[in-house]
Image (cartoon, grey):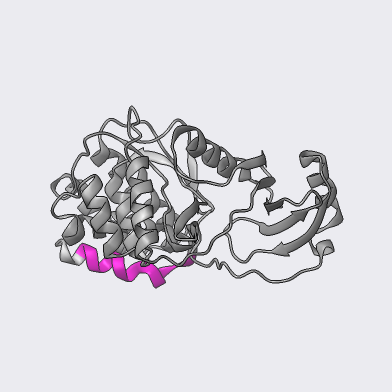
Amino acid sequence: MGCLTKSNKITRARAGDMGNNLFLRLEEVLGVRAGKARPLGGGCIGEVHSVDLENGDRVVVKVDRSSTPRLDVEGYMLQYLAGHSALPVPAVRHSSPGLLVMDFIEGDSRFGEVEQRHAAELLAALHEVRGETHGFERPTLIGALHQPNPPTDSWVAFFRDARLLYMADEALKERRLPREVHKRLRAFADRIGEFIEEPEYPSLLHGDVWTTNVLAHGGRITAFIDPAIYHGHPEIELAFTTLFGTFGPSFFKHYDDIRGIRPGFLEERRDIYNMYPLLVHVRLFGDSYLGGIDQTLRRLGF
């Protein structure tokens, strides 16, 4: 899952560092012996390793040793994207609550103009996949956090209740969000229909498109990883890519050429939608992410 503390750096490790029991488990579920393992930095959930198999394949292995492992949700989301879209994602070889095994995909998170144009084509195609309602058939995850997806006819209502207010309430419960900011968010939510629009239809979204969740190699995007899928307004996906500088003008120009971006998105709605991932990070990491929320609310008069 996407997490702002993660890194793509690969460090060396002895194969035994991953634990003999896990190597036996990999042999059991894959039918082939595991060889050299290297830890992959980052991730919000458990441990992540690159593992060379004795048949020459390489896989990524995620392990969640917590009391409530949920890696099967990530496996489900990757398989859903593979089965319902043309978005490139790693093939899932095994998925269970405590263990997820995927194909290793070559790539890094450096995007030039060519890669950004390709990313625009892939996300534009993803957003053409229609859902019957906003939300999803089951809850998903964003990072390590529960993400509710109640089927909702109105995008405005879904974003207000299942995204903005839900995460604000969760952050308040964890004493990460000041009550004064929570009160202002609720006041804004009461009038949110004045600021955001209904889309033509609910689009399938990756849900967590930030820099290290996209891999590129040889001038092409090779994979989108760590999804947080649901059906919703494509603008929230586009907004997320601007929050930490994932893509730039080349991406937006090409996406606009393909699907169109309505006026007012970059000027106002982008910052409204980015309050959701900022609230996710307030919930996870504390008040260092409050500045962007405060600035948006003040600019909107709240």
Quarter of the figure with residue 279? bottom left
> Residue 30 occupies which quadrant of the picture?
top right
Identify the residue at horizontal 84%, vertical 48% (top origin): 33
Name the residue at the front extreme.
218
Place of residue 73 in the rendered image (x, y in percent of width and height, measured from the top left): 57, 41
Say whether residue 225 is left or right of residue 268: right
Q: Is residue 296 left or right of residue 17?
A: left
* Res. 278 in view: no
Q: Based on the displayed image, in which of its 4 quarters is residue 282 positioned?
A: bottom left
- Please name whichever residue, 45 or 251, is drawn nearer the observer in this view of the structure: 251
- Look at the image and say whether residue 296 sits in the magenta stretch: yes
Q: Nearer the viewer, residue 214 or 231?
A: 214
Please tell me which residue lies in front, 249 or 130. Answer: 249
- Image coordinates of residue 302 in percent, x first then y, are 18, 61
- Look at the image and tell me whether residue 280 can be seen: yes
* Overall secondary structure of the magenta section: helix
Q: Is residue 137 magenta?
A: no
Name the side, left or right, on which 302 lies relative to 43: left
Q: Which residue shows up at 16% across the image and 49% down it? A: 262
Q: Total number of numbered labels?
A: 0
Q: Which residues are magenta?
A: 285-297
Determine whether 206 is above or below 245 in the image.
above
Task: From the top left corner, tell me how far across and down residue 146 is, in percent.
Answer: 49, 46
- Residue depicted at x 27% and y 49%: 235
Q: Give how far across and how far down residue 226 sits, in percent.
A: 52, 51
> Is 174 above or below relative to 205?
below
